[in-house]
Image (tube, grey):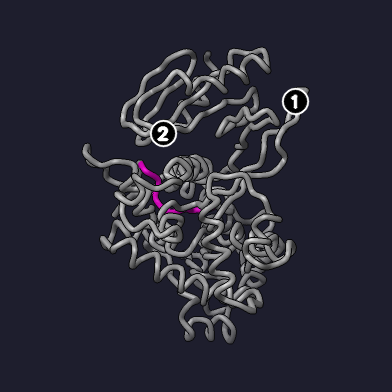
Amino acid sequence: MIHRNMEAVILEASTGFPAITITGPRQSGKTTLARMLFPKYKYYNLENPETRALAKEDPRSIFDGLSEGIILDEIQKSPDLLSYAQYYLDETRLIGRLIITGSNQFEYLKDISQSLAGRTAILKLLPFSINEVSLLPEQSWEIFAHRGFYPRLYDKSINPNLYYSSYINTYLERDILALIQVRNLSQFEKFLALCAGRTGSVLNVNALAIECGVDHKTVQAWLSLLQASFVIFLLKPYSANLNKRLIKSPKLYFLDSGLACHLLGIRSESDLQHHPLKGEIFETVVMGEVVKHFYNQGLPAPISYFRDSQGHEIDLIIETAADIIPVEIKSGKTIQTSFWKNIDYLRKLMKKNLSAGIIFGDRRAEFSRNTKVSGWDRIDIEALIVASKNP
């Protein structure tokens, strides 16, 4: 059993909230984590037709066990249970006895926010972080980028190519087609692949629509769907009054590099080593780790990127209460002085010796020029934040 970084946050939340909601993509480990942390709670899998029938016909029989604790798995299959949950939580005033999981926030998160407002902590569990899996000294970042981080790839040693092929088919059939009218499934599959080819790049919705052969509104709707189902996330541009023309479009990233690799036809780490999008895939891995860091603490990710009209770009800006932390992401294994070029530009622009970070493709760490330089296996966002408070 691989322990998850979110465990302490869930346990802490269970001492203050009547309910805990764990959401995230399919197969990210939500059910396993809930049952591991609350082994004595009665478990209801709402994917099971018989359990759904029970939930519809006799919901009281489920909530009668609330005092001992219950887990409602895949709540989007029986969203009506949320109204009953509100009633029983208010009646009993029990704390931490209801655990809710669900794979797709677009189906039920609105219902949860309405029915259980103020009664539930909502936590987002993504696939494994790098520090949650076992690393061997000879392993490179390309191995993990190609494999991705879904738990079954590590628990069951499944071939990544077979896993992602099945995952995409399941995702399309069970989630997308159930929610929207896709007239041409192959067109949506093309759209998904085109998004993979844009991971780590500034999003141009009009260009994507033209290449995909659909209109602007359709692309926007599909992008929203991919975000809500934890396939991609859009990194907003940094906005500040710097007397510079800043790029206003977001950058697109896949939340799992293995899925992006599969959609790009990358079938091995060797393929990745020679792929023209190698740098963007490395950036995708790192961005995923950054998002997981904040989600695992129950926090939104306060991140953005910087790019001005003159081409100066910082891959990642971590926004803290006191300041910002510029972070450059480089797939190369040799530290170059050029890594500091845009960091120094931003420092000069803001007239501050900002504490900064560089994450690169080797496996070592050092500190230089008020910058924490970290290998891909030593990504420590909290250390960057602490360092920025103690320059």
Question: Residue 335 lies in magenta, yes or no?
Answer: no
Residue drawn where x is 50% and y is 65% of the image = 67
Looking at the picture, how far across and down is residue 31, in whole percent? 42, 63
Label 2 Cα neighbours within 10 Å, binned few <14 / some 14-19 / many ≥20:
many
Residue drawn where x is 68% and y is 59% of the image = 113
Q: Kindly identify which residue carries mark 1.
A: 244
Q: Nearer the viewer, residue 294 or 34?
A: 294
* Quarter holding residue 195: bottom right
Dot 1 amino acid type: Lys
Quarter holding the N terminus is bottom left
Q: Nearer the viewer, residue 27 or 347?
A: 347
Looking at the picture, how far across and down is residue 377, in whole percent? 35, 36
Residue drawn where x is 59% and y is 71% of the image = 187
Q: How many badges with numbers are in the image? A: 2
Q: Nearer the viewer, residue 249 or 299?
A: 249
The residue tagged with tag 1: helix, strand or loop?
loop
Looking at the picture, how far across and down is residue 81, in whole percent? 61, 74
* Above or below 118: residue 162: below
- Magenta segment main secondary structure: loop
Residue drawn where x is 74% and y is 23% of the image = 242
Q: What range is drawn magenta here? A: 124-130
Question: Residue 129 lies in magenta, yes or no?
Answer: yes
* Above or below 101: residue 252: above
Q: Nearer the viewer, mark 1 or mark 2?
A: 1
Q: Kindly identify which residue carries mark 2.
A: 379
